[in-house]
Image (spheres, rainbow, N blue to C red):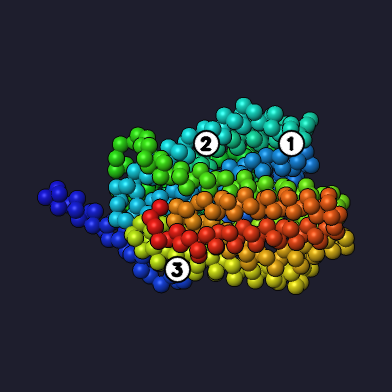
C-alpha cells in the first residue's frame, strides 16, 4: 500500500519532467526558443536596471562613494559573469544532458556537485578580496576617501558573496531542467526587493543614520540570499524536477570534472572580453578625452545587447545539451543555428539602426559636439558588426551546451590579439586617425563570431557526444 502511494505521488513529477524534456526534444524549435528566452531576457533586464539604480542611489552620497564603488564594479561584475555565465552555464548544460539521456539520478548528483563548487569558489573570492582587497584597489588607483568607500562596499559584498554564487548556480540547475521562468522570477523579485531595501540601508530611517555605501552591498547580499532560499526550496521539494536530497552529499570527482570541463574554460570568457575592452579603452585614450568619452558612450549600447544574447544563449545551452544527451545531434545543431541567427538578426538590427542614425543613441548622453561626433564615427563602423557580436555570443552559449569550448575560447583569445596588435599598429606604427582603430575593433567582433561559426560548421561538433 505504501509503495502504491509513493508511486502515485511520484507519477505527476515523472510526467511533468517527461513533458518538459519531450518539448525540448520534439517541439518546434523557433517557438521553443522564444518561450525559453523571453523570461531570461526579462530577468536580465531587471539586473541591468539594478546596476543603474545603484549608481543613482550612491551618487547622492557624493563623488567619493561613486568612485569607490567604481573600483569594486569590475571585480564584482567578473564574479557575477563567472557564477552566472561560466559555472552557471556549465551546470545547466550538465544537468540538461543528464535529463536528456533519461538519467535523472545523474542530474540530481550533478546538482549537488554544482552547489559544492559554488561554495568553494565563493570561499575563494571571499578570502581573496577580504585579504587582499585593499592592495588591489590601491593598485587600481584608489586612495583616501575613495579607497575607504571601496573597502566599505567590498568587504560587505564579498563577505556575503556565497549568497550570489548560490543564487546563480541554483538558477543554472533549474534552467537545466528546462524551467526558465522561476530563475527569472527570482531575479525580478530580488531586483524589486533591492530597489526598496537599498535606500533604507544606505540612508537609514528615522533616527538610524544608515550604513552608507555598505548598505547597498548588504542589500544585494540579502536579496540574493532570499532568492537562493526560494530556488533551494524548489529543488528540495520531493516533487521537484531535480531533487537535491535524493543521495548523500559528498564530492564525486567524475561529476566535478563533468561540470568544470565546461565551466573552467567558460569562466575565462569574461576575463578575455573585459581584457579586449580594457585594451581598446587604453588605445582610444591616446586620441584624447573627447575620443575616450565618445567611445565610452557609444560602446554602452553593447550592454543592451548582452541581456538579449544571454537570454537566448542560456535557452540554447539547455536546448542543445538536452538534445545532445538524447543523441539528437542534428536537432542540437539546428537549434544552435536557429537561435544564433535570431540573436544576430536582433543585435544586427539594433546595430544597423545605430550606424545609420547614431544621434538616436548619442544625443541622450552628451551635448558636447565633439563627443557626439566621435561616438557617431564609432557606431558608423562598429555598429554594422553588432550582428556578428550577437552571433558569436549565442554560439558561445550553444557550445557550452555541446560541451565544446576549445574554439570559443580560441576565438576570445583571437579577438583580444586582433584588438591589441592591430590597435598598436594603427596607433603607434601607422599613426592613423581614431577611425582606423574603430575598424580594428569591428574586425575583432568579426573574427570572434566567424571562428566559432566555422568550428561548428566545418567541424560539426554536434555529430559527437561531449
Of marks 3 and 2, the one in the foreground: 3
The single residue placed furthest to the left in the displayed view is 1
Q: Would residue 365 be found to the left or right of residue 251 on screen?
A: right
Residue hosting label 2:
122
Residue hosting label 1:
140
Residue at image position (64%, 28%) is 132
Residue placed most toward the observer, 326 or 408: 408
Q: Would residue 359 be found to the left or right of residue 101 on screen?
A: right
Label 3 environment density (alpha carbons within 10 Å; few <14, some 14–19, many ≥20): some
Q: Secondary structure at mark 2?
A: helix
Q: Would residue 150 be found to the left or right of residue 465 on screen?
A: right
Q: Secondary structure at mark 3?
A: helix
Residue 309 at x, y = what percent?
A: 57, 60
Residue placed most toward the observer, 369 or 219: 369
Label 1 environment density (alpha carbons within 10 Å; few <14, some 14–19, many ≥20): few
Residue 332 at x, y = what percent?
A: 42, 63
Residue 462 at x, y = what percent?
A: 42, 61
Residue placed most toward the observer, 440 or 19: 440
Gap between marks 3 and 2, in whole Å? Answer: 36 Å
Q: Return the disc, 3 or 2, that comes first in the chain's sequence.
A: 2
Label 2 environment density (alpha carbons within 10 Å; few <14, some 14–19, many ≥20): many
Answer whether labels 3 and 2 touch (C-beta < 8 Å). no
Residue at image position (64%, 35%) is 154
Of marks 3 and 1, the one in the foreground: 3
Q: Secondary structure at mark 1?
A: loop
Residue at image position (47%, 39%) is 118
Residue hosting label 3:
334
In the image, residue 78 above or below residue 155: below
Residue 329 at x, y = what percent?
A: 39, 63
Q: Would residue 307 be found to the left or right of residue 436 on screen?
A: left
Q: In this view of the protein, can residue 403 be seen by the observer?
A: yes
Amino acid at each position: 500500500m505504501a509503495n502504491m502511494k509513493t508511486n502515485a505521488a511520484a507519477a505527476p513529477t515523472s510526467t511533468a519532467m517527461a513533458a518538459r524534456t519531450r518539448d525540448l526534444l520534439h517541439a518546434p524549435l523557433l517557438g521553443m526558443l522564444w518561450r525559453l528566452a523571453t523570461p531570461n531576457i526579462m530577468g536580465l533586464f531587471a539586473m541591468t536596471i539594478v546596476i543603474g539604480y545603484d549608481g543613482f542611489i550612491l551618487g547622492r552620497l557624493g563623488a567619493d562613494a561613486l568612485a569607490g564603488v567604481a573600483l569594486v564594479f569590475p571585480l564584482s561584475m567578473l564574479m557575477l559573469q563567472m557564477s552566472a555565465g561560466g559555472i552557471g552555464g556549465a551546470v545547466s548544460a550538465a544537468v540538461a544532458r543528464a535529463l536528456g539521456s533519461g538519467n535523472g539520478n545523474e542530474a540530481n548528483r550533478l546538482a549537488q556537485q554544482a552547489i559544492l563548487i559554488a561554495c568553494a569558489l565563493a570561499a575563494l573570492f571571499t578570502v581573496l578580496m577580504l585579504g587582499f582587497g585593499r592592495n588591489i584597489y590601491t593598485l587600481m588607483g584608489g586612495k583616501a576617501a575613495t579607497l575607504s568607500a571601496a573597502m566599505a562596499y567590498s568587504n560587505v559584498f564579498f563577505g556575503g558573496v556565497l549568497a550570489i554564487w548560490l543564487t546563480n548556480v541554483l538558477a543554472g540547475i533549474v534552467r537545466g531542467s528546462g524551467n526558465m521562468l522561476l530563475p527569472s522570477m527570482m531575479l525580478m523579485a530580488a531586483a524589486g526587493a533591492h530597489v526598496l531595501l537599498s535606500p533604507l540601508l544606505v540612508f537609514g530611517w528615522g533616527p538610524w543614520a544608515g550604513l552608507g555605501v555598505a548598505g547597498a552591498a548588504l542589500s544585494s547580499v540579502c536579496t540574493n540570499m532570499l532568492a537562493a532560499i526560494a530556488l533551494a526550496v524548489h529543488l528540495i521539494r520531493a516533487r521537484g524536477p531535480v531533487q537535491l536530497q535524493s543521495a548523500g552529499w559528498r564530492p564525486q570527482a567524475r561529476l566535478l570534472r563533468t561540470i568544470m570541463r565546461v565551466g573552467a574554460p567558460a569562466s575565462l570568457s569574461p576575463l578575455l572580453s573585459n581584457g579586449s575592452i580594457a585594451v581598446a579603452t587604453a588605445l582610444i585614450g591616446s586620441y584624447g578625452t573627447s575620443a575616450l568619452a565618445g567611445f565610452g558612450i557609444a560602446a554602452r549600447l553593447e550592454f543592451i545587447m548582452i541581456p538579449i544574447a544571454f537570454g537566448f544563449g542560456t535557452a540554447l545551452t539547455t536546448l542543445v545539451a538536452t538534445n545532445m544527451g538524447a543523441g539528437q545531434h542534428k536537432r542540437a545543431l539546428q537549434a544552435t543555428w536557429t537561435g544564433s541567427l535570431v540573436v544576430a538578426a536582433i543585435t544586427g538590427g539594433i546595430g544597423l539602426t545605430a550606424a545609420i542614425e547614431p544621434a538616436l543613441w548619442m544625443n541622450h548622453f552628451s551635448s558636447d559636439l565633439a563627443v557626439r561626433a566621435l561616438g557617431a564615427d564609432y557606431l558608423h563602423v562598429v555598429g554594422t558588426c553588432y550582428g556578428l557580436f550577437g552571433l558569436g555570443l549565442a554560439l558561445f552559449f550553444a557550445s557550452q551546451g555541446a560541451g565544446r569550448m576549445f574554439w570559443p575560447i580560441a576565438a576570445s583569445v583571437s579577438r583580444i590579439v586582433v584588438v591589441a596588435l592591430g590597435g598598436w599598429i594603427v596607433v603607434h606604427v601607422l599613426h592613423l586617425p581614431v577611425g582606423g582603430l574603430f575598424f580594428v575593433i569591428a574586425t575583432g567582433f568579426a573574427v570572434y563570431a566567424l571562428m566559432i561559426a566555422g568550428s561548428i560548421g566545418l567541424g560539426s561538433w554536434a555529430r559527437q557526444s561531449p
